Amino acid sequence: MALGRLSLLMVGVQVRLLARRVGSAGVLVLDIDNTLADTWPSLLPGVDPKDRLARLEPLPGMHAATVGRAGDRPVVYLSHRFLWQAPVTWTWLRRQGYPVRMHSLMLVPTAADKLKPLGSLAALGPVEYWDDLSFGHEHGEVQFYQELIDQVRAMPIAFHDFQAISDTVDAARGSEE
């Protein structure tokens, strides 16, 4: 629990640091799991979490659709992961060609904890946000954080949801064939 609070304090500081960089072009905010990374197939019992995260496959087309079109906007990674997973997360992002800086990797203890930093960033300028906001893939039934999705949709941000991510990945896979 203490690490969760520390995580949230760090995210608050990171948002304040980003305030100096967010201009009229705004900021690009990206989730990682099931948005940039094909996470759910890796959720197997008995697998070392650090190794699992290090070996995640990137989702096809997501790099080009997100940071490939970011322009001069700062890129923020806002993900429901534990603070101890920051080093392996950082390394994975760098290995996949994602620009990541100390203040741009924001890890929160719950999916709901994404709302406050999103709102703070939206107050600074335009926000483009990619996040599936889903869970349960590994159990064969995709479920959605519908209350969170509704709250995100009520914010003044451009939200790319599960369907937009699926469409992007499907288009990239189709162009590979």
Image: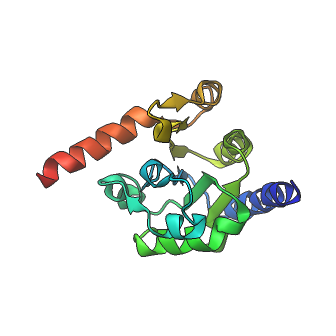
Q: Nearer the viewer, residue 106 or 26?
A: 106
Vertical placement of residue 112 versus 153, above or below: below
Q: Nearer the viewer, residue 148 or 119?
A: 148
Relative placement, left or right, of 116 versus 142 is right
Which residue is pictured at 51% across the width and 43% down the height?
Answer: 131
Please indicate, yes or no, whether residue 99 appears anywhere in the rendered image. Answer: no
Outermost front residue: 46
Which residue is pictured at 61% across the width and 32% down the height?
Answer: 152
Outermost right residue: 2
Vertical placement of residue 123 versus 147, above or below: below
Relative placement, left or right, of 170 versus 136 is left
Please indicate, yes or no, whether residue 34 appears anywhere in the rendered image. Answer: yes
Q: Position of residue 97 (x, y in %)?
A: 40, 71
Q: Position of residue 156 (x, y in %)?
A: 59, 33
Q: Nearer the viewer, residue 99 or 146?
A: 146
Q: Position of residue 123 (x, y in %)?
A: 69, 43
Relative placement, left or right, of 103 versus 52 is right
Vertical placement of residue 109 versus 88, above or below: above
Q: How many marks?
A: 0
Residue 45 placement: quadrant: bottom right
